[in-house]
Image (spheres, rainbow, N blue to C red):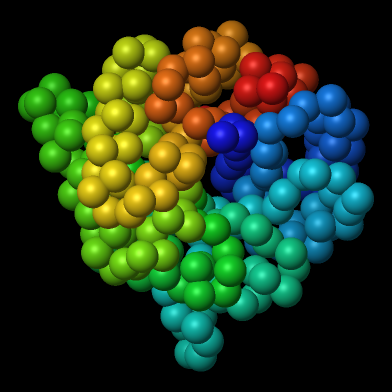
């Protein structure tokens, strides 16, 4: 299976910075064979769509509304994403769960809304430090993924899963390859019970992945790529991660 390296720019970027970053990524990824995406703030969809034209770089969103259309001020629908060539939408990022009180059920609805428009949801799951220390890691990630499996039925094979331990996001503290692989194996087993296509589904690791640690994480049997925050804003670092994924 091809690996997927997806950058999550979060609320970063400017027309000038994006121009330089995307041009450098497009140029530098020419030799790689893995799948590459950048999940950018919505106002930049059109800019990045034009910058990536003719390359293998895919465009992603960082969120999507669970609603199809209507009186939902500030929301962006999956159909709108599709009009700009968006291929992926992150759903359930821990920053959305934490700062916007997104529940497991809401995340599942968002995944469904994306799938209905042919957009691949990158469903984030992950435990907080307190949950890990209380020995609840497996329970938490299984509960989060179960909601998405339950709401999406046989379409579940079309999603991408990202394991992002909350304590590793933006902290410089990465899960060890063993810690990550252990959780990825749990998620794979859960997918196996849900769909015969479980072994062609990508499970990404996210949480302070960088140029130095990417290769060992990506060498784990159940780690099929990375969701990369901070390091996706620097072309040289992002390209080293892409090279590590081949
Ligand atoms: C993320 O935001 O999905 C993430 C993994 O961030 P960072 O790589 O900066 O930890």
Residue 35 image point, x, y percent: 68, 38
Q: Is residue 168 above or below residue 85?
A: above
Q: In the depicted view, which residue is nearer to us: 127 or 32?
A: 32
Find residue 2 and report its horizontal and vertical position in percent. 61, 34
Q: Is residue 67 left or right of residue 150?
A: right
**Farthest residue in the front direction?**
196
Say if 63 sits above or below 224 in the image.
below
Q: Can I make out residue 112 in this image?
A: yes
Q: Quadrant of the C terminus?
A: top right
| One can see residue 124 in this view | no
> Which residue sits at x=80%, y=63%?
46
Question: Closest to the observer: 184 or 79?
Answer: 184
Is 35 in front, or is 76?
A: 35
- Residue drawn at the location 50% of the way across and 31% of the way down: 224
In the image, farthest residue toward the bottom: 70
Q: Residue at x 42, y 55 (%)?
A: 157
- Examine the image and state in which quarter residue 205 appears: top left
> Taking 208 as reference, is 124 left or right?
left
**Image quadrant in which the N terminus is located:** top right
User: Residue 120: x percent and y percent?
Assistant: 54, 58
Q: Residue furthest left?
A: 134
Above or below, 99 relative to 187: below
Q: Is residue 66 left or right of residue 118?
A: left
Pick whichever, 56 or 128, lies toward us: 56
Quadrant in the picture for residue 126: top left
């Amino acid at each position: 299976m091809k690996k997927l390296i997806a950058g999550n720019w979060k609320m970063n970027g400017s027309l000038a910075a994006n121009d330089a970053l995307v041009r450098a990524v497009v140029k530098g990824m020419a030799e790689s064979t893995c799948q590459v995406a950048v999940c950018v703030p919505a106002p930049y969809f059109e800019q990045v769509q034009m910058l990536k034209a003719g390359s293998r770089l895919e465009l992603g969103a960082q969120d999507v509304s669970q609603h199809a259309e209507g009186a939902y001020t500030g929301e962006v629908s999956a159909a709108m994403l599709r009009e700009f060539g968006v291929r992926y939408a992150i759903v359930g990022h821990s920053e959305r769960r934490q700062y916007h009180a997104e529940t497991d059920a809401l995340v599942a609805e968002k995944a469904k809304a994306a799938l209905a428009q042919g957009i691949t949801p990158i469903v984030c799951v992950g435990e907080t430090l307190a949950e890990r220390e209380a020995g609840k890691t497996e329970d938490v990630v299984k509960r989060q993924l179960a909601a998405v499996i339950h709401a999406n039925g046989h379409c579940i094979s079309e999603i991408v899963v990202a394991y992002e331990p909350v304590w590793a996001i933006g902290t410089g503290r990465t899960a060890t390859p063993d810690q990550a692989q252990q959780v990825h194996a749990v998620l794979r087993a859960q997918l196996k019970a849900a769909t015969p296509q479980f072994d062609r589904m990508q499970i990404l690791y996210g949480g302070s992945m960088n140029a130095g640690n990417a290769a060992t994480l990506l060498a784990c049997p159940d780690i099929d790529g990375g969701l990369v925050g901070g390091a996706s804003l620097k072309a040289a670092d992002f390209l080293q991660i892409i090279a590590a994924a081949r």
